[in-house]
Image (cartoon, rainbow, N blue to C red):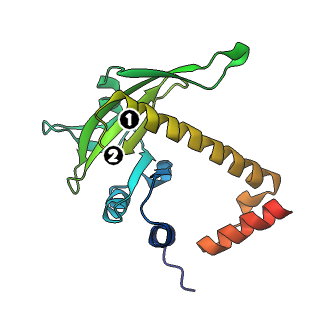
Amino acid sequence: KGYKSQRFLIQQAIATLVQRLGPLGVWLFDRGFDNWEFFAFLRDLKLKFLVRVNSNRIVKLPDGRSMSMGKLSRSLPAQARFVWGRKRKGRGYVIEVSWAEFSIAQNGQKLWLIVARGFGRHPLLLVTNRPVDQELCAVKLARSYLKRWGVEEAGRLVKQAFDLENLRVLSWAGLVKLVWLAMWA
């Protein structure tokens, strides 16, 4: 009965966690959180964040020009490289990383784009509010996001094994209980 919206519930859960744990660490989010209002919400909580974004988002560059994330990502040369994972025969993927500063057109919030290329047809586009001014920072953030995918794989396994895709819950507590029950089963 008291359901407002999915975004409201998620923001309420995040605010509760920050209230209890503090604003420590870097919070990682998938493409479903690519929203300038959500970025402002995280800024207001004083959280450091890393969000995977869509290529069609329009941003403003420091020189005043506007362009899409996709076009910006294609214009950036590789600035760092690292090896990720292991392919067959023990070789990993060589990931090329680049980054650039931009701001959100709607509210002027200053952010950084990190682009990771080398393991798929399309680059991985990540947005952070942590200043990216050196290779180590960009590589560390890209690695952090790639590690986050391991959590997605575990969640997908639980959802598929127990056919949870067809069940809907209306609260964060309901989701937690559903996943715990599935894992215990």
Return the residue found at the far left.
63
Quarter of the image where the N terminus is located: bottom right
Specify the amino acid type for callout 1. Answer: Cys
Give the quadrant of residue 24. Answer: bottom left
Residue at position x 48%, y 28% in the image: 122
Residue at position x 51%, y 41% in the image: 145
Residue at position x 24%, y 41% in the image: 102
Q: Position of residue 57 (x, y in %)?
A: 34, 44
Specify the amino acid type for callout 2. Answer: Arg
Which mark, residue 137? 1
Q: Position of residue 101 (x, y in %)?
A: 25, 38
**Mark 2 and mark 1 in contact (Cβ < 8 Å)?**
yes
Identify whether 2 is placed above or below 104.
below
Mark 1 element type: helix
Mark 2, residue position: 130
Q: Position of residue 38 (x, y in %)?
A: 38, 60
In the image, taking residue 180 as reference, residue 47 lies left or right, namely left
Circle 2 residues within 10 Å: few <14, some 14–19, many ≥20: some
In the image, taking residue 82 as reference, residue 65 lies left or right, namely left
Identify whether 64 is placed above or below 43.
above
Identify whether 150 is placed above or below 47.
above
Asked whether 49 or 6 is in front, the reply is 49
Residue at position x 55%, y 37% in the image: 146
